[in-house]
Amino acid sequence: MLHPSNIDDGFPAEILQLIFDNLVSETRTLARVGLVSRSWRTLSLPFLLKDVDLSSHNNGRLPEYETPSFPLLRGVVMADYSDEYRPRSLVPRQRAFLRLITDRPELAMHVKAFTWTLVWKDFDENGLADMDLRTWDVFSRLQNVARLDLASLHNISDQPYTRQNPARLFSAVTHLRLVGWMHRGLVKAILASLDASKLGCLELDHLQDEGALPNGEPIPQDLATKHSHHRGDPYDDEGIDDKLRARQERGDAAIFPGPMWFPLRLLRQRCLGSMKRLQIRLGPFTDTPDRRNYITMFHETAKFIRSAKDTLKTISIGLGEHPTLHCEDEDLLSSCRTSRITIRQIYRPFCFDLTSAFLHRLLAVLTEERFPHLTRVDLEGFRIIRNGTSRLARPPSPDLTWQYIRDCPFIDEGFTKTANIDYRQPFSGYDYYISGMDQDKLDELEEILERS
């Protein structure tokens, strides 16, 4: 703290600090305050850094990017969909922050809330800049961050540094939100560092596993699509068991893209003594990702809720509904007949089975367990269970589903009418091809992928 005699305009430092503290959310104002004098900049800088937001994924809908000629499938663009949808100032501002903390590492202690979108490269850049290579070092210094909102939206497969994060990051986090597609090493570094007994809020918003080859490199889209497991009964199968996960950890099996259930499994095995809010948002179901990731996500969500039942106050679960899922038939007239048949006879039943299986997992835990503090449960995107049909032709009886709904003390039938139309496409691997690998090595890799 500066002594009042060091403030060149006579204002007591304590009064200025109170004023600056009230301006924490006013980033531009605080930045201008620092231009008044050197002493004001010294005094205001910690407050300017208290809540750092250098992100693009929270900008919501972006009408300027929408494509009117394809309103059904591409009519809405969201800022958390891709790294293409960001202001041109984002990367320069991120690098300025990295430079500041690199030059003055003592300032890192002042950052209490941190919102960041990992896009890495600026527009038209071919590689990482020198300052980008300080990212993990700067992140490791942010040891007082309590609220972390981290998104990964980059489409980079050829820069190893982006996956060479430290083993421990953000150890003081009590409110965690993860968005986009991430490699497990980054997620594990955060979860292994924080004190799970103090974690009060967990939000997984369209969080997806970017996937990995057995050697840890990101999996190419073509190999992921070719070798993903597309069969499996969502009502009965276990999904990714501990044995397969152990093989993945050892590098004996590949990790396929899909909804990331990994944080739920890792956290529920620890003491969750303060967990009050759980929010999970999944993108529209498609048959591209490995089916086992969906099934595992259903299991792990239910198990996580059970493990935190003594402290949870609110639960919010949202399933993204594909635009074609609930559109009127006349809206599909511009599509070819084969596409219309696929939507009606394959896609809708496929989505019904996944939605129904997930709902049964949720209803079972919400009905069977005692929740002393739970006051609100929000479920959205489950409309298909009202009039859907099964692809497997043997789901639990629809009458049983409605009986579960009536028996659950936290919901009523109204949630089955709540829409959640979502235009996001699932992440299915990076668009690159393995090069420089001889045929014997490629055959060996293909065999491992088949056994994964």
Image (tube, rainbow, N blue to C red):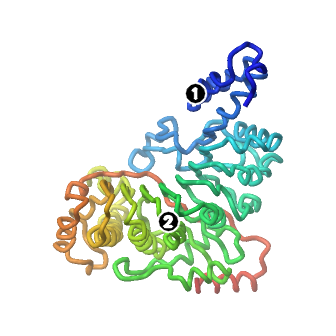
**Coordinates of residue 145 in the picture (x, y in percent):** 62, 48
Which residue shows up at 51% across the image and 72% down it? 265
Query: Which picture quadrant has residue 195?
Result: bottom right
The N terminus sits in image quarter: top right
What is the tally of numbered marks visible in this picture?
A: 2
Quadrant of the snapshot with the C terminus: bottom right
Q: Label 2, secondary structure: give it.
A: strand
Percent coordinates x, y for residue 27 in the rendering: 61, 29
| Residue type, label 2 | Pro
Instruction: Judge by depth and name the residue closer to the eye, 100 or 223.
Output: 100
Q: Is residue 25 above or below residue 121?
A: above
Residue marked by disc 1: 23
Extreme-top residue of the structure: 9
82 or 361: nearer the viewer? 361
Q: From the viewer's perspective, is 99 left or right of 208? A: right
Q: Looking at numbered disc 1 in the image, what kind of residue is underneath it?
A: Leu
From this viewpoint, is residue 179 visible? no
Residue at image x 60%, y 82%?
246
Rendered position, 122 above or below 393: above
Q: Which of the 4 image quadrants contains residue 7?
A: top right
What residue sits right under mark 2 in the picture?
259
Q: Quadrant of residue 160?
A: bottom right
- Residue 384 location, x and y as percent? 27, 62
**From this viewpoint, is residue 107 visible?**
yes
Residue at horizontal 35 percent and vertical 67 percent from the top:
351
User: How many angstroms separate mark 1 from mark 2 (CA)?
Assistant: 38 Å
